[in-house]
Amino acid sequence: MKGFVSTMDRIAIAAAAVAAVLLAAAALLITWMVIWRSMGNSAWWEIEAAVYLMVMSLFLASPYTLKTNGHVGVDLLAHYLPPGKARRLQIAVAWVGLATCIYLAWATGVFTFEAFERGDRTESTWAPLKWPLYLAMPVGFVLTALQYVAEIYRPVPGTAPESAA
């Protein structure tokens, strides 16, 4: 499992890098939009494009956020538990997160496929297809679910890898 954990860590870092590029592109697009509009010009596509980029970056950054313990969590109970019990609590919480991500990956995958089949578009003047935006959700949830598996099997420093499961 050590190989799986390190592979998932690398995938999480790569997904976070892609998310950072998407977020930087959204920031540049918004900056361009402000400058363009301040010169009296008009554009009709940039806000929606920036929203697409930001939403995609959010879901792609999720596995890295989990890997670096950046998700919002309440760890007061774990703080006062002995290390062994705190680890068991951490694993139990990871199983709940894993189950949630699996369900959300399935549900958003169905949602994305239906939008693809119907050829759904936004109601804006630009009217881009919705499924590319929606696709970020199941991809992000699958990657986050896999990262939860990696967190369940991640060795605790100073212990044997078998004690992580």
Image (cartoon, helix red, strand yellow):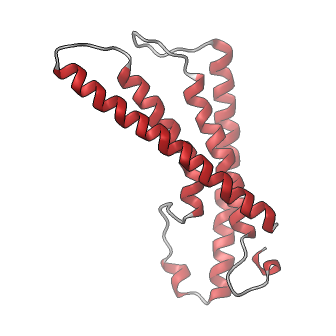
Residue 18 horizontal/vertical position (percent)? 55, 42
Residue 64, by quadrant, is: bottom right
Q: Is residue 123 left or right of residue 153?
A: left
- Which quadrant, please, contains the N terminus? bottom right
**In the displayed structure, would residue 12 be above or below residue 80?**
above
Q: From this viewpoint, which residue is outermost toward the top?
A: 125
Q: Residue at x 79, y 84 (%)?
A: 160
Query: Position of 54 compared to 147: left or right?
Result: left
- In this view of the protein, which residue sits in the foreground, 108 or 132? 132
Count of numbered circles in the view: 0
Name the residue rendered at 47%, 16% in the picture.
122
* Quadrant that contains the C terminus: bottom right
Residue 123 visible in the current orientation = yes
- Towards the viewer: 63 or 10: 10
Give x and y (percent) for residue 39. Answer: 17, 18
The structure residue drawn at horizontal position 59% and vertical position 38%, both measured from the top left corner, is 137
* Image: 159 above or below 29: below
Q: Position of residue 84 (x, y in %)?
A: 68, 86
Q: Is residue 98 visible?
A: no
Q: Is residue 60 above or below residue 87?
A: above
* Residue 91 picture location, percent across and down: 69, 71
